[in-house]
Image (cartoon, helix red, strand yellow):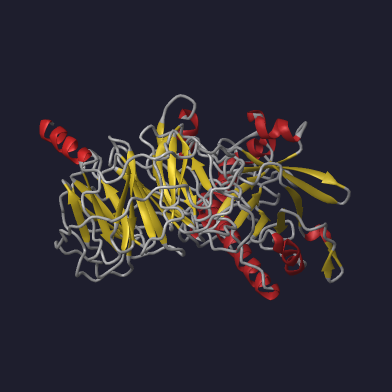
Amino acid sequence: MLMKKVLRAIAGSASLFRQVQGEPPSAGRRGTGAQWGEPARDGQGEEMLMGAGKIVTAAIAVSSVLLASGMASGMASGMASGTPSGTPSGMASGTPSGTPSGMAAGTPEAATAQGLPVAGRSALAASISVPAYRLVASDGGIFAFGGTPFAGSMGGKPLDKPVVGMAPATSGNGYWLVASDGGIFAFGSAQFYGSLGGKPIPSPIVGMAADPLAGGYWLAAADGTVYGFGAATVFGSLAGKPPASPIVAIAAEPDGLGYWLAAANGAVYPFGTAVSYGSLAGKPLNKPIVAMVPTADGNGYWLVGADGGVFTFGNAGFYGSLGGSPPAQPVVGMAPTPSGKGYWLTTARGGISSFGDAGYFGSVIWNLVRPITGISEGPGNGDPTVSGSYPPGATGYDISFPQCSGSGANVPPRSEIAIVGVNGGRAFTRNPCLASELSWASNSPGVVYMNVNAPGSSSNDMTGPAGSCSSSDYSCQATNYGYNAVNWAISYAKQQASQVGTPPPKAVWLDVERVGGCSGTTLPSSGYWTCSTSLNASVISGAVDAISTAGLAGGIYSTAYQWQKIAGSYSPSLPLWIPGGSSHSSVCSGSSYWFGGGKATITQGQSGNFDTDEAC
């Protein structure tokens, strides 16, 4: 410890850059997020192969917001020239909002989690602090999950250059954002120590790291130049000696006496007291490296590829990856849990995959205009929901086969919430107006609902994910039926969407209603549901699994009374779309209306001939 203190004193006296007057942290409202991420598939890492764990179907949300191994290591010297300072680039007056505008179609991935189940987290949320995470988009929008504090964002404000990364403050209640021109934006407890905003730099900034002890931060450019602010000492860089592959990340030693640079080809460059534990230099990679994260004690690090491959060095543990089964969108960042026994990966679409003891609390995958560019860990309360799943107060309509009129459809005005029914009131039936109704919903595309029910006399339940069922294995038949019904509905919706040029389904609400009452406790059922809640729950469970397997988001439309009568105590912990109630606010805030381990996301009412919807 004494040697570290001496080194710190020497480093402090040699610091090129000192704190300059900065702007106050900006306040803003939470960036409206959405939930769901990719499935944590089995994958390959640097050291071992591990299963990613069970898939937990998580919450759905809609938002208009934005959006192998070598041991060579380069020891490069050199200092960044100049004395960067000034005002954050693109800072606008007023109160930054986390609600960037605009829409863009995308392809969400399935949600997953490892560690504490969603339902368990919800029960613990009020009493404990758990590791959670924040995401940042290139427009500076911030999305906080798991109860992690939201301290403001640049969402909706003009920026000279896109935001390329973020770093959490030591307290966990603040963070810095950095733009590619070196502009810095400080929020919450994060202090502003200066930036490169407005100053010419030879190569764009690609990332930042906070000095964990002395205060301040480092910025790294693609050519390997390092800039220090506050008490963050520049221990060396690649300035004047650019690497063969561009630098993509900087990671700080926990004691602040060194840092590493990582290149897209997996090369690692240590500076100060940072030690090389190996790299991927000279090794073939399926996709370039996009992130580097140190372990809590600095005796190891992780490298992450754009395909979700995780590579471990030193004492960094391997807990799974997406390598070998990459997500639809590239992985752009990684954040470890404080224990070092787990981590999260995020895609450019905001999908989250969690591994080890990292809990899943939601994702941003819907209608992002600007991609996600970074992720950081922060203290949370374990809440698996996101405030503002839809933008709070957003309104709209849902329509289906009852709105069919001749060969077209009788549709309401276009709206922010637009949900279309796929079938004709029962599983494996068609809404004949689906194509035209999907065209109506093109302002908020990809959100559909389908009625589910117990199987009657059908050939759609004897084979499926539960296997080939015997005539007396009713649970097997029910599970297969629910699964096959969703796959059929998704296929039909995709085919109809392609006819009118709208995106395929992104999310499926399961309409669970007690239509027609129950009949018997075996299958086939002559009623809409059986009188066995366990069999009905198997149908719904199969449907939920199919939504997850298809890489879509999912939720439940029902009421607490109907759910209890149909599914009993089954708790898939999905977001809820709830009709009726004494008022919109009472349903959104009153747990007496909630069921199945979920929370209200949308309420439904009626206006004239149309069902109306409003976001909580």
Residue that sits furthest to the left in the current view: 3
Residue that sits furthest to the bottom in the current view: 499
Residue 579 higher or lower than 276, as above or below: above
Residue 298 higher or lower than 469, as above or below: above
Residue that sits furthest to the right in the current view: 608
Residue 507 quadrant: bottom right
Side of 176 relative to 304 (left or right): right
Q: Nearer the viewer, residue 93 or 83?
A: 83
- Quadrant placement of the N terminus: top left
Residue located 23% across and 61% down the image:
238
Side of 296 relative to 177 (left or right): left
Residue 455 quadrant: bottom right
Query: Is residue 490 something one can see in this rendering?
Result: yes
Q: Nearer the viewer, residue 579 or 321?
A: 321
Q: Nearer the viewer, residue 231 or 547?
A: 231
Query: Is residue 454 something one can see in this rendering?
Result: no
On the image, the x and y values in percent for residue 112 come to: 44, 50
Residue 98 quadrant: top right
On the image, the x and y values in percent for residue 342 come to: 32, 44
Q: Nearer the viewer, residue 385 or 280?
A: 280
Side of 333 relative to 473 (left or right): left
Residue that sits furthest to the top in the current view: 127
On the image, the x and y values in percent for residue 270 come to: 19, 53
On the image, the x and y values in percent for residue 616 come to: 67, 39
